Image (cartoon, grey):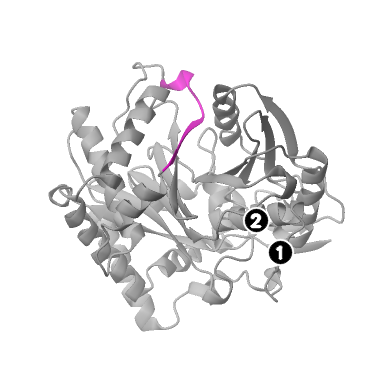
């Protein structure tokens, strides 16, 4: 049977993924009409066939194993599609929250899940992709194939064997001793800033002691109108990017939220994914090709959106110039020869993954995507949202996509930290920061 090794990021996510803080990527679309279960089943099978890792499963390994393998069976273990009916918007919310809280088994091929949710005002397709398997851009690319095939539209792929481009050290590892030393210097600086743990988002709406009775995630979705999206983007001053602006807005919202809850101010740290794919296949290839950097704002910089954006931009510019995103790949090469039973203790072996250093929040941006497509007789895709993991003590994450001139934002939260009313209030505060004057 064909196999391929887990890359550095696959292995890392496998070793730090724990219930009820499952590290999953949630991506969904809504259409204006009704989706045929039969046609979606066909499109799903065809999309899986087009992307090798989409049909993989984790090979069984002993605790003494020093490497993990994906294997590719000739036949799928199952079709990962569940069909549900929602009689109301509240039903959709309940289904979504259960869905994002599921930990998908990695030993079944394929090891991701799809929900088709029928709704009178337009159906939903939801994707739950374990981060051990692939990243957010992979989820988008896989769903894009499903939509294209369903609608009998072209779905071109790059002329690359996806299993030949899985070496992350070759893509992003240090190319010289000078670069390795520069990255080591940046890592020491990060650990120095982290000597004092970052601020946490204040819980709200959950009675003391009730947190353990409320496992799993919840999701709050928000879409800015085209006018409001244009207003938000108009605040950007070069060289800052729209992503810098978004990071600053989320940080200011957390500061204001914590002030309302009378929680002491502190350094707000934000985990930010960085795509390691080369430009030639920037939005292609299903797998883990996303590293991470940490952006921080001290209390003195949590003032205006303009000032906070400037401080964020200074850090992200420096990261790009130094290739800091590759630092994590260099670091993860260290424990590759450890046996599995030790790798499973990665959080304890590597302080970088410990809870004391976990960032305040996780903000992932899919960037500017193509225009929302048609799904054939199911109608136009009217919304696209996604959310990244929110493992404690992070408790809150944000997924951003800019599609068809609209900002679409998904907030994922731990139910042990927030109730529905609290997360709605947080989303309203975030929207105010996005569209109000600087």
Q: Is residue 309 left or right of residue 13?
A: left
Say if the magenta span includes residue 214: yes
The reply to whether discs 2 and 1 touch (Cβ–Cβ < 8 Å) is yes
Q: Residue 24, how many percent across, how many down?
A: 56, 44
Q: Is residue 344 visible?
A: no
Q: Residue at x 33, y 68 (%)?
A: 319
Q: Residue 223, how many percent across, how many down?
A: 44, 42
Q: Quadrant of residue 19?
A: top right
Q: Is residue 69 above or below residue 203?
A: below
- How packed mark 1 is, by other alpha carbons closer than 10 Å (few <14, some 14-19, many 20 or more), is some
Which sits in the foreground, 63 or 40? 40
Query: Quadrant location of the N terminus?
Result: bottom right
Q: Quadrant of residue 339?
A: bottom right
The secondary structure type at the circle numbered 2 is helix
Q: Residue 26, how many percent across, how many down?
A: 56, 43
Q: Residue at x 31, y 65 (%)?
A: 316
- How packed mark 2 is, by other alpha carbons closer than 10 Å (few <14, some 14-19, many 20 or more), is some
Q: Quadrant of residue 422?
A: top left
Which sits in the foreground, 409 or 313? 409
Q: Residue 12, how many percent across, how many down?
A: 53, 54
Residue that mark 2 sits on: 144
Q: Residue furthest left?
A: 300
Q: Which residues are magenta?
A: 211-223
Residue that mark 1 sits on: 155
């Amino acid at each position: 049977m064909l196999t391929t090794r887990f890359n550095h990021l696959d292995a890392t996510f496998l070793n730090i993924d724990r219930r009820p803080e499952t590290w999953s990527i949630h991506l969904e679309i809504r259409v204006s009409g009704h989706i045929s279960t039969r046609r979606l089943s066909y499109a799903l099978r065809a999309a899986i066939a087009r992307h090798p890792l989409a049909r993989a499963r984790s090979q069984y390994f002993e605790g003494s194993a020093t490497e993990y393998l994906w294997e590719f069976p000739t036949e799928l273990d199952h079709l990962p599609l569940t069909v549900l009916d929602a009689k109301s918007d509240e039903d959709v919310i309940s289904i979504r929250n259960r869905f994002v809280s599921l930990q998908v088994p990695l030993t079944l091929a394929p090891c991701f899940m799809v929900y088709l949710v029928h709704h009178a005002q337009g159906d939903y397709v939801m994707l739950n992709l374990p981060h051990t398997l692939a990243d957010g851009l992979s989820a988008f690319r896989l769903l894009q194939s499903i939509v294209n095939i369903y609608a009998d539209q072209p779905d071109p792929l790059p002329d690359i064997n996806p299993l030949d481009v899985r070496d992350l050290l070759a893509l992003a590892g240090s190319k010289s001793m000078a670069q390795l030393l520069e990255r080591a210097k940046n890592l020491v600086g990060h650990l120095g800033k982290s000597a004092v743990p970052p601020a946490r988002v204040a819980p709200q709406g959950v009675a003391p002691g009730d947190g353990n009775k409320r496992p799993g995630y919840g999701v709050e979705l928000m879409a800015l109108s085209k006018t409001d999206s244009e207003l938000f983007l108009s605040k950007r001053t070069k060289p800052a990017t729209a992503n810098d602006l978004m990071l600053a807005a989320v940080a200011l919202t957390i500061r204001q939220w914590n002030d309302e809850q009378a929680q002491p101010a502190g350094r707000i740290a934000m985990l930010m994914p960085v795509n390691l794919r080369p430009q030639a296949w920037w939005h292609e290839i299903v797998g883990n090709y996303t590293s991470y950097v940490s952006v921080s704002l001290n209390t003195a910089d949590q003032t205006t959106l303009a000032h906070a954006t400037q401080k964020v931009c200074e850090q992200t510019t420096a990261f790009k110039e130094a290739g800091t995103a590759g630092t994590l790949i260099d670091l993860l090469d260290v424990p590759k020869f450890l046996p599995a039973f030790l790798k499973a203790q990665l959080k304890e072996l590597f302080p970088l993954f410990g809870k004391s250093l976990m960032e305040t929040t996780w903000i992932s941006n899919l960037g500017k995507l193509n225009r929302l497509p048609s799904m054939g007789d199911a109608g136009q895709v009217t919304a696209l949202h996604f959310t990244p993991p929110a493992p404690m003590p992070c408790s809150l994450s944000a997924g951003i996509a800019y599609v068809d001139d609209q900002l679409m934002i998904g907030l994922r939260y731990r139910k042990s930290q927030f109730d529905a009313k609290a997360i709605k209030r947080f989303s309203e505060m975030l929207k105010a920061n996005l569209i109000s004057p600087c």
